[in-house]
């Protein structure tokens, strides 16, 4: 799980107007990527993408006969798969779910019959998982006036189309991601959740993370004793079904918190992070997976196009088809279904209906209209792309949401799933063309045209320019031309996790400034990638900064340096952190890789690494907090002040040396009920005391995010000569009689 705080400082006492403090996530707008791709690996928008998991390639296939009806009686031997012209061995085959909507013409309704009950599968799916359906309501774009239409359509769909063997969950995206109903086969729970979703979307736009966590806790309590080792081995019987729902819910939350940073809330909207998280959480879940999004559409700037593509890639690696229904319904300027248009480039997925059926299509426009009007509505462009490139469909131009859902249901129940181990096991990022043949005369195969061989661990998206920057970290010929100082000091957080303030410092004389009238311009690119081990990217931090400095701000930077801070929350483990800073005006680059080890939190008396600083920013409007507390949620705050780390640890004579750290697990006195810790700081130069040791007593514990004692003191360096120094820090638990020590080096310059 990851959250971020960004602080970009360029002054000792001055907080610049472009300082950023963001709780949750931020992705700053970058210049349009200019990195070139090879001809072989360049993506063609007409080529669809499928899943690569390990070396296993999954492909969803639909087959129609000459009359346009779905064919659902084929066997594994009827399919032949070619990848880049090389025949592949099909190792897994899952036929369509024989349900109420396979596309085969059904018997007419009896007189007076208004609707049919949902037909159930006619064969036992022994060993074969069923439909896994995620219903997602985009509350950010769906108007209140349209919410009733969505609600009514979803309720009708659940009552009449959802089979007893279908597993369905309901999500809502408002201020963030809400899990209103974890995956279940209980229709009553789903119907209640739909009502709740409609009410929540019309009354609140706030992100309720606690609601997701509460659902996870309840599910885990209900599934106590079930083995959680492998979600792919879980059956749908009893507690195992609840456990799978709990595991997926936990993964959805984790992936959302991770991906919302990478995909960005600033411009691309949280819906992209939500879609990616829901899909990624299901990557190792078996079944025919479908996501249905109700949205009125949104605009994403062209410079963030790669973020949309990353969402598509994540969905395809998880083999989740995304269908989208326009929740705005039929608009006055909506196109009419009838005029012929050239076949859509999406026909490889959705197929093209017979000409006589296109004049009065129920449940939304047909494929001809999608081809004609794609690009005519910017808010719908992304919806066309996401649905088409993931094997789904975009349904718009209808007030009958239930009918649109019925059309979608027909497709998802007609899908075959094939899987094979590719004869080319390399994840080279190149496009691999797929061709699927069926041994039945006159049959039409509807499948994706190919896939990009992207490693399954690459979940967090990187733009082409960022990939080029990141390559400089490990390039043998890479030589940093820009000085860079780095500091990473972990602090404990809730749930056994850590908050790690990542601080970067660049000397002011190494940065190029461009005069513009009465201001100075600075352009820096910052990229930080946190990996678990050597491969799996957990988080992508940083941004692209184009700053115009006033004379006062510029002078402040000349007196100090350029600072950047961003926090990341991580679980215990071993990580590698790649850092790149590029000065766009000079072309200079700094590239570093650091190892970060976070041990399991113990119960022994301990302290964090000391953070040294010469800059403290007062917090003017902090809300009331516990005694001694600082900025709520900021691990480097105390007593209404925010500490700015100094990674270079270079001080000048006359500066104040600020020392900041936390103490954990100090025993409480039986008499007072409070802990008592004695801290002694001794400054050494050449092994000799430069100042008399200074003693402090700490007794007031801070309870957030977990109980601890905070040491935040300053020592005047006035009168000390230039040279290398060491601060020797000793903390004694006076109640339990335990001692911890550490040393922190720094330099005093003239």
Image (spheres, rainbow, N blue to C red):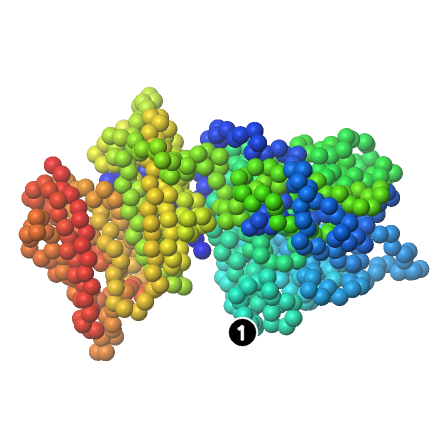
Counting from the top left corner in percent of width and height, residue 261 is at 46, 46
Say if residue 654 shows up in the picture.
no
Tell me where residue 505 appears, x and y as whole percent: 28, 40
Taking 598 as reference, is 300 left or right?
right
Image quadrant occupied by the N terminus: bottom left
Residue name at image x 62 percent, y 38 percent:
432
Q: Residue furthest top?
A: 517
Q: What residue is rendered at 55% in x and 36% in y?
A: 305
Q: Is residue 157 above or below residue 164?
A: above
Neighbour tally class for label 1: few under 14, some 14-19, many 20 plus, Cα within 10 Å: few
Q: Residue at x 21, y 73 (%)?
A: 736
Give x and y (percent) for residue 615: 23, 45
Q: Secondary structure at mark 1?
A: loop
Seen from the viewer's position, the closer of residues 582 and 379 is 582
- Decide: is 195 above or below 331: below
Q: Nearer the viewer, residue 177 or 672?
A: 177
Q: Is residue 374 above or below residue 129?
A: above
Q: Which residue is mark 1?
A: 224
Q: Nearer the viewer, residue 516 or 622?
A: 516
Q: Position of residue 284 (x, y in %)?
A: 58, 57
């Amino acid at each position: 799980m990851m959250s971020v705080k960004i602080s970009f400082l360029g002054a000792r006492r001055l907080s610049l107007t472009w300082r950023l403090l963001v709780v949750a996530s931020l992705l700053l707008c970058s210049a349009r990527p200019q990195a070139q791709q090879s001809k072989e690996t360049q993506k063609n928008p007409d080529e669809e993408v499928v899943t690569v998991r390990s070396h296993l390639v999954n492909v969803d296939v639909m087959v129609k006969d000459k009359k346009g009806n779905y064919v659902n009686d084929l066997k594994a031997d009827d399919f032949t798969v070619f990848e880049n012209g090389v025949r592949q061995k099909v190792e897994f085959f899952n036929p369509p779910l024989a349900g109420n909507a396979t596309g085969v013409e059904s018997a007419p309704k009896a007189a007076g019959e208004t609707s049919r009950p949902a037909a159930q599968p006619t064969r036992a799916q022994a060993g074969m998982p069923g439909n896994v359906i995620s219903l997602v309501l985009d509350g950010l774009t769906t108007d209140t006036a349209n919410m009733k239409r969505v609600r009514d359509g979803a309720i009708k769909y659940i009552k009449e189309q959802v089979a007893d063997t279908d597993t369905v969950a309901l999500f809502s995206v408002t201020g963030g991601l809400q899990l209103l109903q974890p995956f279940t086969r209980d229709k009553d729970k789903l119907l209640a959740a739909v009502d709740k979703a409609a009410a929540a979307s019309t009354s609140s736009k706030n992100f309720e993370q606690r609601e997701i966590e509460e659902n996870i806790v309840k599910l885990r309590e209900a599934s106590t004793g079930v083995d959680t080792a492998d979600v792919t081995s879980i059956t749908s019987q009893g507690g195992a079904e609840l456990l799978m729902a709990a595991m997926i819910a936990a993964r959805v939350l984790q992936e959302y918190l991770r991906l919302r940073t990478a995909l960005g809330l600033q411009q691309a909207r949280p819906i992209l992070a939500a879609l990616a998280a829901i899909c990624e959480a299901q990557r190792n879940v078996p079944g025919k997976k479908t996501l249905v999004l109700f949205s009125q559409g949104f605009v994403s700037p062209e410079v963030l196009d790669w973020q949309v593509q990353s969402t598509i890639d994540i969905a395809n690696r998880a083999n989740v088809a995304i269908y989208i229904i326009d929740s705005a319904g039929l608009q006055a300027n909506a196109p009419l279904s009838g005029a012929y248009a050239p076949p859509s480039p999406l026909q490889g997925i959705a197929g093209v209906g017979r000409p006589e059926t296109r004049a009065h299509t129920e449940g939304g426009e047909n494929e001809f209209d999608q081809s004609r009007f794609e690009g005519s509505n910017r808010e719908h462009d992304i919806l066309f792309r996401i649905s088409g490139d993931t094997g789904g469909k975009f349904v718009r131009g209808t007030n009958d949401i239930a009918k649109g859902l019925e059309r979608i249901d027909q497709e998802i129940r007609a899908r075959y799933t094939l899987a094979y181990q590719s004869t080319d096991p390399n994840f080279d990022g190149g496009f691999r063309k797929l061709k699927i043949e069926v041994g039945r005369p006159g049959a039409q195969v509807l499948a994706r045209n190919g896939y990009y061989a992207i490693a399954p661990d690459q979940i967090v998206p990187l733009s082409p320019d960022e990939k080029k920057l990141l390559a400089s970290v490990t390039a043998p010929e890479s030589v940093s031309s820009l000085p860079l100082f780095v500091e990473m000091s972990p602090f404990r957080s809730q749930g056994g996790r850590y908050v790690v303030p990542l601080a970067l410092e660049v000397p002011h004389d190494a940065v190029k400034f461009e005069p513009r009238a009465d201001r100075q311009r600075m352009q820096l690119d910052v990229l930080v990638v946190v990996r678990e081990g050597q491969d799996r990217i957990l988080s992508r931090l940083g941004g692209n900064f184009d700053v115009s400095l006033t004379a006062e701000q510029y002078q402040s930077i000349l007196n100090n340096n350029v600072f950047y801070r961003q926090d990341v929350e991580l679980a215990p483990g071993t990580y590698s952190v790649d850092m790149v800073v590029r000065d766009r005006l000079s072309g200079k680059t700094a590239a570093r890789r650091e190892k970060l080890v976070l041990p399991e939190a113990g119960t022994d008396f301990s302290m964090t690494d000391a953070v040294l600083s010469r800059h403290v920013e007062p917090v003017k409007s902090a809300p009331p907090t516990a005694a001694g507390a600082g900025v709520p949620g900021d691990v480097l705050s105390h007593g209404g002040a925010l500490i700015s780390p100094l990674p270079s640890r270079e001080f000048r004579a006359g500066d104040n040396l600020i020392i900041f750290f936390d103490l954990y697990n100090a025993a409480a006195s039986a008499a007072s009920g409070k802990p008592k810790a004695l801290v002694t700081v001794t400054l050494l130069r050449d092994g000799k005391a430069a100042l008399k040791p200074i003693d402090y007593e700490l007794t007031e514990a801070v309870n957030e995010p977990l109980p601890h004692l905070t040491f935040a003191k300053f020592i005047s360096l006035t009168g000390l000569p230039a040279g290398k120094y060491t601060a020797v820090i000793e903390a004694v638990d006076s109640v339990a009689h335990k001692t911890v020590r550490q040393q922190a080096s720094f330099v005093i310059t003239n």
